[in-house]
Amino acid sequence: MLLPETALDSRPERMSEASARKTPVRMTTATLDQSNVSRSAAEIAEQSKKVVTRDVDFFYGAKQALYKVSLDVPEHCVTALIGPSGCGKSTFLRCLNRMNDMIDDTTVRGEILLDGKNVYRRGTDVVELRKRVGMVFQKSNPFPKSIYENVAYGPRVAGVRKRNILDEIVEKSLRQSALWDEVQDRLYDSALQLSGGQQQRLCIARALATNPDVLLMDEPASALDPKSTAAVEDLIFGLKKSYTIAIVTHNMQQAARVSDQTAFFYEGHLIEVGATNELFTNPYEKQTEDYITGRFG
Ligand SMILES: Nc1ncnc2c1ncn2[C@@H]1O[C@H](COP(=O)(O)OP(=O)(O)OP(=O)(O)O)[C@@H](O)[C@H]1O
Ligand SMILES: [Mg+2]
């Protein structure tokens, strides 16, 4: 059946309308600054989809927190999840590596595929899944152990015993998380002596040490000062060459700076997803526009 012409025309019209009246967007500068490094919609479309979710509903007891969320997370891209407090961003992120399993009386429905396989299928090795889909939390949470032992922890649990291999993993992970130069002479000092920004990068190193494919980051820089935030953002940008990243952030400039694709959540619904440059300059949905221009949230 042919669509009525008006339906076919509605998107271009909406776009030209918006650009004609110069949609109020606070992030224009940041967005343009990154235009040479963030991926275009066409490039994102070309990437294979590392994680695919279809019609995901999530419940805490009887309370529904996610409604039919269908989102593709493209490989080697950074996907930012934005939206007001309580809209389900963390819940969604935790579904991807089944971290929500640890919360009693929760129900998930729909499909969550990692490389085409449903992570909720019977027989999934959840420990293995969480190695492949690592997570970094808002509040850095190093173990009360040495810097070295924090990074070596995951590989040790996975059965790596040889000291030279552990040494290699620790150095590689600390280099990847841009911390090596600052800590190479104090690897056996307590991780708790590091600054907040260093602790957060250590937690990123700890997540990288198990050689994940996907890195989930829940507001990783929200407790950091501007310098540490910049360090973590630079790091995220570098990491996407090797990893697929999903990051929750309340900071619109940060989403514009680090991500290729942005997904806007509101009250448990995925309202809109698109290439970051496009979503921030030309959102399709009024709710998205209101949120990114600071009218609520
Ligand atoms: N452990 C839990 N038990 C019951 N309800 C929860 C639990 N965790 C989250 N919720 C509820 O689920 C909804 C979504 O919460 P979620 O933490 O995913 O939001 P969020 O978008 O990450 O918010 P924020 O930006 O404040 O971190 C909220 O209504 C919240 O109260
Ligand atoms: Mg949250």
Image (cartoon, rainbow, N blue to C red):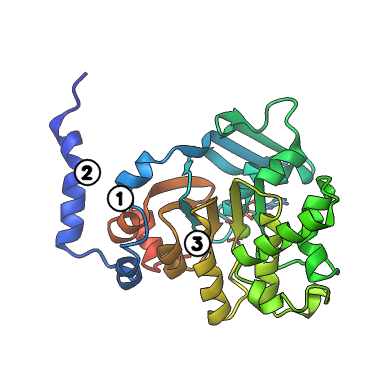
Work out whether mark 2 precedes mark 3 in sequence or the reverse, and give the earlier one: 2
Which of the two marks, 2 or 3, is nearer to us in this view? 3
Compared to 12, does 135 lie above or below? Answer: below
* Circle 3: element type: helix
Asked if the residues shown at circle 2 and circle 1 are in contact, with their CB atoms under 8 angstroms apart, the answer is yes
Work out whether mark 3 precedes mark 1 in sequence or the reverse, and give the earlier one: 3
Q: Left or right? Give the position of 68 relative to 206.
A: left
Instruction: Quadrant for the N terminus, please.
Output: top left
- Which residue corresponds to the image point at 33% horizontal and 51% vertical from the top-left? 285
Compared to 251, does 123 lie above or below? Answer: above
Foreground of the two, 192 or 162: 162
Residue that numbered label 1 is attached to: 284
| Image location (x, y in percent) of residue 19 | 18, 59
Within 8 Å: ligand 1 and the Cβ of disc 2? no
Count residues near mark 1 (Cα–Cα under 10 Å), then give few for <14, some for 14-19, many for 20+: some
Compared to 82, does 56 lie above or below? Answer: above
Compared to 95, does 291 lie above or below? Answer: below
Q: CA distance from mark 2 to mark 3?
A: 34 Å
- Which residue corresponds to the image point at 48% horizontal and 51% vertical from the top-left? 265
Q: Left or right? Give the position of 21 relative to 224.
A: left
Q: CA distance from mark 3 to mark 1?
A: 30 Å
Q: Which labelled disc corresponds to residue 11?
A: 2
Foreground of the two, 28 or 184: 184
Within 8 Å: ligand 2 and the Cβ of disc 3? no
Residue that numbered label 3 is attached to: 238
* Circle 1: element type: loop
- Disc 3 residue type? Gly
Foreground of the two, 54 or 215: 215
Number of callouts in the render? Answer: 3
| Image location (x, y in percent) of residue 134 | 66, 50
- Disc 1 residue type? Tyr
* Circle 2: element type: helix
